[in-house]
Every structure is written in C-alpha cells, then in structure tokens.
Image (tube, grey):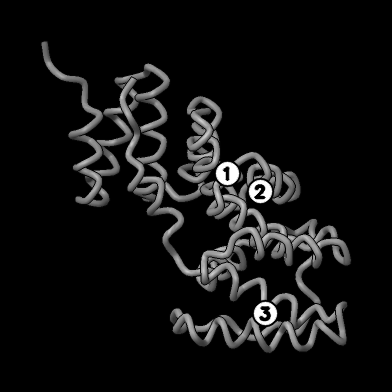
Amino acid sequence: MKHFSTLLLCSALALPAAHAQQAFTATTAPALTASTTAAPAAPAKRLANSEYKAHIKAADAVLKTKPKDAEARLSRAQAHLELKNYEEAAADYTALLRTQPANAEWLYLRGTAYLRGEKFQPAINDFSKILKADPQHKASLLYRGVAKMKLLNFKGAIPDFGKIIEQEPENADAYEYRGVCYSHAGQDALAVQDLEKAAALNPEAAKTLKRYRPSKK
C-alpha cells in the first residue's frame, strides 16, 4: 500500500482557528442553533502567541469568579486552539456545549480541536452531528473526510469528498483527497482521473498525481 502524504492531510488543518470559524459560518447548519454568546469578532490574521496567552489569563480571571461566563470560556477555547493546546480547547468547548448541546458552531470548533489533536473518532462524531442537520455543510464534510483518512478509512471518506465536488465542481482539494482515497481503495483509474482534475485546477496537486499514478510496466 502506498503511504499517503502527511503534508497533504496537514494542509487541511493548517489554517488558524479564526479561519476555521469563518469556514463554519460560510455554510451554517440550519437545524442546529447558532451561538447566542456575544463572542468577539474573529481577527483577520493570527495574533502573536503572547496575545493569546494574555487572553487565556484574562479568561481564567473571569472564570474564577464567574465559572458560567460563556464569553470568557469561548475566548479561552479559541486562544487554546490557536496555541495548539487542543485538549484544553476541546474541554472548554465541551463545557460550552453542556449549556447549548445543539450549538453547531461550537460542535464544529470542538471537532476541529479533536481532529488537530489526533482524536479522530470524536472529531468524526462532532462533524457527523452537524451533517445530520445539514448534509451539504462543506467544511464539516472536508474535515470528516480527512479524519476518516487518518483512520485509514479511505472508502468511507470518498463520499464526503464527493459531496463537496457535487456542490463545488472546481474544488481542487476535494478532487485531490478523493483521488488519494481511490488509490488506497485499489481504484487506480478513478484515482488518476481525480488527481488529473486536481492538477488541472491547482498545479501544486501535480506532485500528488506523480506520487499516485500507477507505474507503467
């Protein structure tokens, strides 16, 4: 079996938490609730680590006297996510979800924390809850597909990337991921077809095509 590219999978997880939040809001799951917390607006670019640490310190001070303060806990969760403190971020999102179990944004962000922290099945569970309400939610489809790939469930990931392509036929990343999945599922013709399409849309994908194209005998 070919070894799938770690860099390829990591590229889906490289965006700052603020961008993950924006990806969620681009297609909000309708049957789940949006946040009712007056959360601060997501920054346009990543802050310095010292600033995130300051956010955590400030949130800690608030939560010491007001443990149910959702705004402070959300701020701390986002800062932990940016600092790659994935376990702490997931714990804060879990605490928030106890008060609003159907909050789709918090489910998505906790799923992101689980995925980046390599807790793939819990991540799949969170993204699946969102997709149950909105089967076309692209950000959740992408991350659930990536989590399945990390668990080597390539056949299971193929439909997730396929649904993204149905919505967005020019999505190079979805073609590239699905092509890799097809390759590992032993469907080389479909793999090459998807990877050629990905390379046509994004020249960087040509590297993946070269890696996975069956060698001529």
In contact (CB < 8 Å): disc 1 and disc 3 = no
Specify the amino acid type for callout 1. Answer: Arg
User: Which image quadrant: the C terminus?
Assistant: top left
The residue indicated by pointer 3 is 75
Instruction: Give the total number of marks visible in the rendering.
Output: 3
Residue 140 horizontal/vertical position (percent): 59, 51
Specify the amino acid type for callout 2. Answer: Phe
Residue drawn 45% across the image and 50% down it: 168
Return the disc, 1 or 2, that comes first in the chain's sequence.
2
**Residue 127 has which mark?**
2
Q: Quadrant of residue 93?
A: bottom right
- Image height check: is 87 above or below 196? below
In contact (CB < 8 Å): disc 1 and disc 2 = yes
The residue indicated by pointer 1 is 144
- Image height check: is 168 above or below 75? above
Q: Quadrant of residue 194?
A: top left
Give the structural element (helix, strand or loop) at label 2: helix
Which of 199 and 120 lies nearest the eye of the viewer?
120
Residue 199 horizontal/vertical position (percent): 23, 44
Distance from the alpha carbon under mark 1 to that under mark 2: 6 Å
Return the disc, 1 or 3, that comes first in the chain's sequence.
3
Residue 202 horizontal/vertical position (percent): 25, 51
How dense is the environment of label 3, judged by Cα within 10 Å: few (below 14), some, or many (20 and up)?
Answer: many
